[in-house]
Amino acid sequence: MAHAEGRNLGLVEAEDGAGRQSFVERHRQLLLGCLAVALFFAAWQAVFLVVPFNPLFISKPSLIAKALLDLIASGQLLDDLRVSAIPFFYGFTAAIVVGVAVGIVMGWRARVGYALDPLMTALYASPLVALAPLLVVFFGVGVAGKAIIIFSLAVFPFVFNAYAGVRAVDPLLINVVRSLGGSEMNLYLKVILPSTLPYIVAGARLAVGRALVGVLVAEFFAASEGIGYAIARFGDLYALDRMFACILTVMVIAVALTEAVRWAERAAFPWRSGQ
Amino acid sequence: MSETGAIKANIAIAAEEAGAPSTNPWRRWEASMLGAGSIALLLLAWELVPYVFTISPGTKLFFTTPSQIAGTLWKMFATGTIWAPLGVSASGFALGLGLAIVVGLPLGVLLGRWRTLNAMADPFITAFNATPRLVFLPLVLLWFGLGLWSKVIIVFIGALFPILINTYEGVRNADKTLINVVRSFGAGEWAVARLVVLPNSLPYVVAGLRLGIGRAVLGVVVAEFFGSEEGLGVLMVQASGRYQVDVVFAGLIIFATLSLLMTGLVKLLEDRLSRWRPQRTAD
């Protein structure tokens, strides 16, 4: 049975020392993953040997690769990415600063927490994307409009995670710092922030995804540049190879951002990696 | 998982420190009163803005008050104009979510029990889960056209992964000792699944469902914004084009209420299904 096997392998590995295992065995997971991806693209390419190819309906990997190289060579892709990255940066930074501050105050001052919790929950539950058309009309399609949409989507994971993090602070630690004569500032810096940080980073992982949604929503609606706009425009032009190239780029960026946060989480707070 | 437990424990500690056993009614209702009070205060302040500040005609286009929103909401339901678009949105939601459950559950179980397949599927699941599904919208529109099926697909992509991943986690976290015991008594793979794996993964599945619902509602909104001809989302986009801000907010409230309502129902289901459990294992 699969799991028992996995368990035993782990034990054997621990006893024998990892060095004795072959390369394939050690990287089985990774190799299988790469193999599957390669197979997928190969199958995608090969299927059109049998099925008639309609460039208005689907593209194939060879054409997508070519389109991707063209877009990179002409600098168009980088331009679009830069245009999208700037509001992303502003919105996300604002979300971190505001979200963490609000969350920590909510967690530390019980009454503030009581007062804001239902409000925040209601806002978090409502599909705020729905306000995007309004925000676009009001703030325009420039950096400000996009950044505000990104901010309003990305701020809540930070609020809730910082809130939960502060409430999970070990009361014993607080009492110790207090008994030893620590000031309020010491409490924040030595106890609350360090124990809240893992929660905040976990929140960042959620927020990245929501912020990306914000970028795309804003740019689908009304924009004249940016990666979301590029995807929508290539779709309208039936330039499927270039559209797929942009979609793949966004997928790679999304995975890279998410994995980077996850890596940071593991590197900075190894004791939490099991959760 | 353990986070909720920790939080609950801390709330308990905080409550003790605050002297929860006291019979003072203010203490007992403080949390809910403050919560409701802050919302009421916010709404009141919003309502009073036009009386306190003079709003320029330009800004007035974008401005509405809670009472206006409530009036619009009431009118929508009273005249029944809301039911047709709501029905369209609901059918897209239900079909997409249903499809996600039908595909996600068996696939999650399969991936949880079969390591090779899991390793091969992992890059795809990671990629699709990390990527906002909105990115596929132009493609989906191209393939399925404006209308119901594009919406269903977008809802499906959004809701599939939380359900799939949670089912997989639940199956994988099944207690090995229990599996070995059942096995020792001569159970086959089916009996193991029915007696150990399924009951054990149920809380995870329901938690996945809860996440999936949230994402499905978002999927409906987004899909209707960009590629649909009817539905609540379309109503909202059209309204924002006509500066009918109250209609936009009314739509937002309807979506939020539906989302909260359904999440609440699933939560009830979760409590009901995990009643036999000594403590909750998943969140």
Image: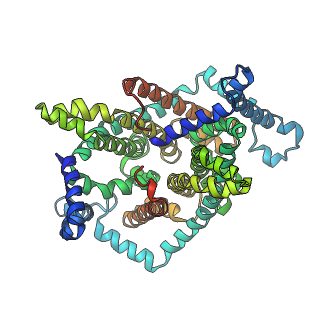
Residue toward you, A69 or A181: A181
Specify the farthest residue to the front.
A180
Report x, y in % for residue A265.
48, 59
Q: Which quarter of the figure is the N terminus of chain A placed in?
A: top left
* Residue A48 visible in image: no
Q: Position of residue A18 (x, y in %)?
A: 24, 67
Residue at (10, 32) in percent of width and height: B186
Q: Is residue A112 above or below residue A35?
A: above
- Residue A64: which quarter of the image? bottom left
**Residue drawn at (56%, 66%), measured in percent from left and top?**
A85
Residue drawn at (36%, 66%) of the image: A241
User: What residue is shown at x 34% (from left), y 53% (from top)?
Assistant: B125
| Residue farthest to the bottom, as pictured | A73
Q: Please state which of residues B52 and B23 is positioned toward the viewer in this rendering.
A: B23
Q: By what rule are the colours in the image chosen? A: rainbow
Direction left: furthest residue: B186
User: Does residue B38 appear anywhere in the picture?
Assistant: yes
Across and down, in percent, residue A190 comes to 64, 58
Asked where in the image residue A271 lies, by quadrant, the reply is: bottom left
Residue A87 in the image: above or below residue B160: below
